[in-house]
Amino acid sequence: MSDAARGADAVTEPQELTAAGSLPAVWRDHAIREPRRPCLHDPKTGWVSRGELADASAEVAGRLYAAGLRRGDRVLLCAPSGAGLVAAHAACLRMGLVVVPLNAALRRPEVLHVVTDASPRGAILDDPEMRSWVLEAAPGAVVCTAAVDLPGGTVPSLDDLSGDEPAMLGYTSGTTGAPKGAVLTHANLLAGAEALRRAWGWSRNDRLVLALPLFHMHGLGVGLHGTLHAGASAVLQTSFDPETVIDTVRDHGATLFFGVPTMYHRLARSERVADLRALRLAVSGSAPLPADLHRRLESLTGLRVLERYGMTETVMLVSNPLDGDRRPGSVGFPLPGVQLRLQQPGESPESDPEVPDGTPGEIWVRGPNVFSGYWRRPGAGPDARGWFCTGDVGRRDADGYLYLEGRTGELIITAGFNVYPREVEEQLADHPGLAEVAVAGRADEERGEIVTAFVVPAAGRKAPSVADLRAHLDERLARYKQPRAVVAVEAIPRNALGKVQRHLLGKVAGEPPPAT
Ligand code: AMP
């Protein structure tokens, strides 16, 4: 196997990354060693120490156990970022429950889909509407807020987990449009956090400004797990505001910031952006960081943002180097313990050679970070030897840097959020003003892409406006999935099989092709 396939770091054996067994085992050791060390800053109540977090999560675990939840049970989790949410999350992982993070923006049909698919036995949700939807589909579930206001109890075992036990079910939309649950084991989560600790030199002295939502791999698997794993600290924020981030860097002596490109766009517009130079490391991911924004940030702050590439199914897999050239437009090299291969579409890493440097290929990944499979979908996910086809297309330059070129599927990434066109099309199909509709991404400087509806109006009707579509979708789809632009066309381009030819949508509308 070539060094490129093995990873830039050809030294780390995959089993080194998972030797500690599970994240909770590492967290327990940190809490025992230095219980009073500050760990999380809650937006309302201030600092919580490692010992306080350990005690709070043990207490919550006792209550969940007394309510009847047992190892392997799935528990939905969604609340604003704060120490309460983290204690609930840690409690679930420590007692062997499987956390199912839910995006706070999901609407009723989206929540019902997850409930029906995951069959949760518990739900820790701050939003009363969301709790009522869960109870509709799972009437017997234990349902509470992030305060976990349930009677107390004692849990027989904490932090005693084997690496192959499931820890999280991360819902992510496949190209089919219906979100699937990626089963991440305790070993996967640990390997992801340990690889980042090594690659980014993450230490107990680091302090992260964590303004990313904690229902997504970026905020949860990278920001929160990485912080707790390194014994470091994080300042939690319930939403992103550029001025607050800059204030926090100064007021809390932060060393790290992780963001999606849209956040960096907004930071670059602040008059005080130069204050970010106090950071040790700024990381971007979830969507492409435009090379010119990378360069602009460097000239404004002196920071060379480190771009990395990850996904729900694999935690993180590729990163620019901490020491060494961070190349604008590139996501870098495989992380420690991660194997990567670029294959011709339709070929497999088992039997076929990689594409040559400079040629785009489908990205396959293998390593201790790669999930075990999709929940209740046998056969989908990694192959028998652990290789997983990411659906992303990339090419390597002669120095081994990876550049992402696009996706084999049709995912739109808008402001760091993933939107699958088919899901939006399905909800627009019964709009009375539309004869036909197709959805695609269109390049947008600030958001990367914007969800765009290409519509054929119903006979005798004018094309609906963005506001009309929103009124139709508000109860059905999260806001970030709703179209921000409408383009009227005479016909939707389709191939012989009737499949929408998304790459031609811009052409029929007489404008440049949409970004896909
Ligand atoms: P998710 O599962 O929501 O984390 O989405 C994963 C997808 O986001 C990947 O398969 C990529 O298509 C995309 N992605 C993640 N990081 C980057 C990046 N740095 N540049 C471009 N796309 C990215």
Image: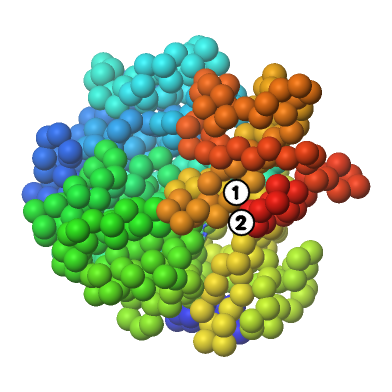
Quarter containing the C terminus: bottom right
Q: Secondary structure at mark 2?
A: loop
Q: Is residue 98 left or right of residue 175?
A: left
Residue placed at 60% from the left, 42% from the top? 452
The residue beneath circle 2 is 515
Give the camera-side residue of 296 and 372. Answer: 296
Coordinates of residue 28 in the picture (x, y in percent): 24, 49
Residue 273, compared with residue 44, is above or below; it is below
Give the camera-side residue of 479 and 379. Answer: 479
The residue beneath circle 1 is 441
Q: Amino acid at mark 1?
A: Gly
Quarter containing the N terminus: bottom right
The answer to whether residue 73 shows anywhere in this view is no
The answer to whether residue 482 shows anywhere in this view is yes
Q: Is residue 265 left or right of residue 448?
A: left
Q: Amino acid at mark 2?
A: Ala
